[in-house]
Amino acid sequence: MVNKKGQQMTLGTIIAIVLGIAVLVFLIFGFSTGWTNLWDRITAFGGGEANVDTIVQACALKCATQDVYGFCIANQTLKIGKGEDDIKESCNILATNDKYKKYGIKSCPGIACPGP
């Protein structure tokens, strides 16, 4: 019994232990601070709920493809961020209304939107 070795842990066992500890810490933090607070912290890493750049690109694409319905009629949901209401308007309204020009959505000269 001179060359006796101890039992070795496999890599899979070590990974399972680390993942188990991470899940346990996540659950403890969630229950102690509240799940809403935890979710707000997680979404903050991804930029939160603001989608201004996405809507700007979507409206530009609708203009480039001459999508009259998508640009003139279909409402887009513009999410500014926390504490501000979502804006639900068409790309045409977002591009032509002075109150929304600050978001950088360009009007589309190739599309003649029907009037109200």
Image (tube, rainbow, N blue to C red):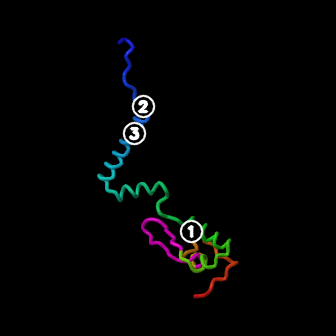
Viewer-proximal residue, 16 or 23? 16
Q: Is residue 81 left or right of residue 115?
A: left
Q: Are marks 1 and 3 in contact (CB under 8 Å)?
A: no
Give the quadrant of the C terminus. bottom right
Q: Residue at x 61, y 76 (%)?
A: 71
Range shown magenta: 76-92
Residue at the spot of label 3: 16
Spatial separation of the CA atoms under disc 3 and disc 2: 10 Å
Crowding at dot 2, Cα within 10 Å, few <14 / some 14-19 / many 20+, comes out as: few
Tag 3's secondary structure?
helix
Tag 2's secondary structure?
loop
Q: Is residue 81 left or right of residue 98?
A: left
Q: Quadrant of residue 13?
A: top left
Spatial separation of the CA atoms under disc 2 and disc 1: 49 Å
Q: Amino acid at mark 1?
A: Ile
The residue at the far front in this view is 1
Residue at the spot of label 2: 10
Look at discs 1 and 3 and give the one toward the viewer: 3
- Counting residues from the start of the chain, the first of labels 1 and 3 encountered is 3
Where is residue 20? Give x, y as percent.
36, 42
